[in-house]
């Protein structure tokens, strides 16, 4: 876990945000318990100037934060699950 946090801190200091961090994008160098962890798939990454902010909503649907989902999307999700599980 420490390696992942340090890697994220490093890329953030360089002005890069990953925007699609999920288990599938974390790679172990070996199957040993002390293996190094690498962050992969910077396809959605963005470069931000100091103090800047990224407005584009992106990420993998199963991992995206709820705060990124619009009110309209939330209504659709509620209707979908309500009709499916009630």
Image (cartoon, rainbow, N blue to C red):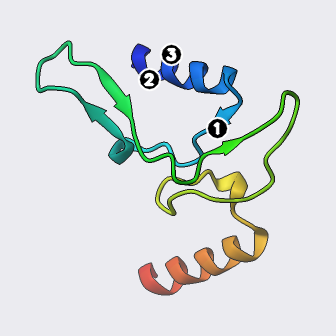
SS class, disc 1: strand
**Viewer-proximal residue, 50 or 67?**
50
Furthest toward the right, the residue is 51
- Whichever of callouts 2 and 1 sits on the residue coming sooner in the sequence is 2
Q: What residue does disc 1 label?
A: 17
Residue 79 location in percent, x, y? 60, 82
Q: Is residue 75 above or below residue 15?
A: below
Q: Which residue is mark 2?
A: 4
Q: Secondary structure at mark 2?
A: helix
Q: Are marks 3 and 2 in contact (CB under 8 Å)?
A: yes
Figure disc tally: 3
* Residue closest to the far bottom: 83
Residue that label 3 marks: 6
Query: Relative to 10, is 41 on the left or the right?
Result: left
* Residue 12 pos. (x, y %): 66, 26
State if disc 1 and disc 2 touch (CB < 8 Å).
no
Mark 1 burial class by Cα count in 10 Å: few <14, some 14-19, many 20+: some
Question: What crowding class fits label 2: few (fewer than 14 Cα within 10 Å), some (14-19), or many (20 or more)?
Answer: some
Query: Which residue is more in the foreground, 16 or 20?
Result: 16
Left or right of residue 55: residue 85: left
Location of the N terminus (image quadrant): top left
Residue located at (11% from left, 26% from top): 31
Up the image or down, 73 lies above or below 40; here it is: below
| Label 2 vs label 1, nearer the camera | 1
Which residue: 51% across, 87% down? 83
Identify the residue at horizontal 79%, vertical 47% (top origin): 54
State the CA–CA distance, disc 3 to disc 1.
Answer: 13 Å
Gap between marks 3 and 2 measured at Cα: 5 Å
Q: Position of residue 45 (x, y in %)?
A: 60, 46
CA distance for labels 2 and 1:
13 Å
Residue 64 picture quarter: bottom right
């Amino acid at each position: 876990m420490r390696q992942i946090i340090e890697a994220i801190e490093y890329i953030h200091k360089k002005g890069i945000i990953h925007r699609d961090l999920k288990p599938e994008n974390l790679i172990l160098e070996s199957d040993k318990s002390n293996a190094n962890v690498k962050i992969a798939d910077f396809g959605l990454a963005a470069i931000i100037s100091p103090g800047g902010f990224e407005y584009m909503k992106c990420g993998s649907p199963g991992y995206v934060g709820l705060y990124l989902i619009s009110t309209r999307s939330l209504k659709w999700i509620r209707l979908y699950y309500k009709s499916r599980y009630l």
